Amino acid sequence: MNQGDSNPAAIPHAAEDIQGDDRWMCQHNRFVLDCKDKQPDVPFAGGSVVQLLQPYEIWRELFSPLHALNFGTGGDTTRHVLWRLKNGELGNTKPKVIVFWLGRNNHENMAEEVAGGMAAIVQLINTRQPQAKIIVFDLLPQGEKPNPLRQKNAKVNPLLLDTDRGFVHSDRAISCHDMFDFLHLTGGGYSKVCKPLNELIMQLLEETPEEKQTTIA
């Protein structure tokens, strides 16, 4: 589909300060400084599924040694991440691999629009960080039982790459042992995702610049 201005999910937009505490913008400003001061090799960007990964031991075990930084912000959509990238995040640095994991917060967008928003992010990074290899995660299922949001996520993934990590059981239910609130991952849930992700990042770090490509995980 056309990724131009007709796709609302591909138009950069700062998050609205609904609570009135300016946390979103303060966090963005911190991320901009972290990029400049810490020069990450493997930055992660996205919503709460990225943000909540950092406190787990698996982050320190698998990703901290790779000089990774976590730029996850709860509630962010493709529009918010695009705005953040256009306004200094991942600037003043030359990352080797960039991991994006978002899309489930795009509640107001159709599946094709969500995929288009992700494509816009990839296009922006390819322009501003041509040396970086990009990993784009598919959308995880959500909700204990089948529901419209889970169905929409399933429509987005074939536009990327449909992968099955075993979160949906034979009865089509999701276990609270994988997602404690049927949305956010537990330590065990992150383990299912992060160990293969670590292997993929290691593989990409070993490739030459000529082998650069966008990977859907």
Image: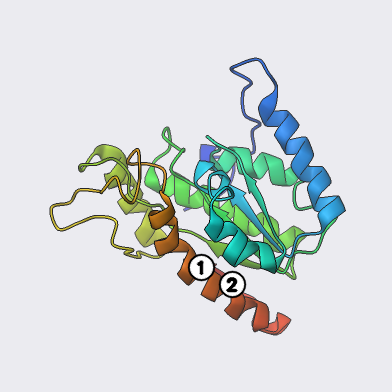
Residue lying at 20% horizontally and 48% vertically, measured from the top left: 173
Instruction: Give the residue pinned by disc 2.
Output: 201
* Numbered mark located on residue 54 in the image: none
Q: Nearer the viewer, residue 87 or 172?
A: 172
The reply to whether discs 2 and 1 touch (Cβ–Cβ < 8 Å) is yes
Q: Up-down: is 6 above or below 53?
A: above
User: Residue 204 location, x and y as percent?
Assistant: 61, 77
Give SS at disc 1.
helix
Give SS at disc 2.
helix
Q: Residue at the far left: name it.
A: 171
What colour scheme was applied to this rendering of the protein? rainbow
Give the side of residue 97 with respect to residue 191, left or right: right
Q: Nearer the viewer, residue 211 or 172?
A: 172
Residue 7 visible in this rendered orientation of the protein: no
The image quadrant of residue 87 is top right
Q: Residues within 10 Å of mark 2 (few under 14, many from 20)?
A: many
Q: Amino acid at mark 2?
A: Ile
User: Residue 49 location, x and y as percent?
Assistant: 49, 46
Q: Nearer the viewer, residue 124 or 52?
A: 52
Q: Residue at the far front: name it.
A: 57
Q: Residues within 10 Å of mark 1 (few under 14, many from 20)?
A: some
User: Residue 7 location, x and y as percent?
Assistant: 52, 41
Residue lying at 44% horizontally and 56% vertically, measured from the top left: 190
Residue lying at 31% horizontally and 64% vertically, measured from the top left: 164
Q: Up-down: is 210 above or below 87?
A: below
Q: Amino acid at mark 1?
A: Leu
Report the Cα–Cα distance between label 2 and label 1.
6 Å
Q: Nearer the viewer, residue 11 or 40?
A: 40
Residue lying at 53% horizontally and 39% vertically, measured from the top left: 77
Instruction: Give the residue pinned by disc 1.
Output: 197
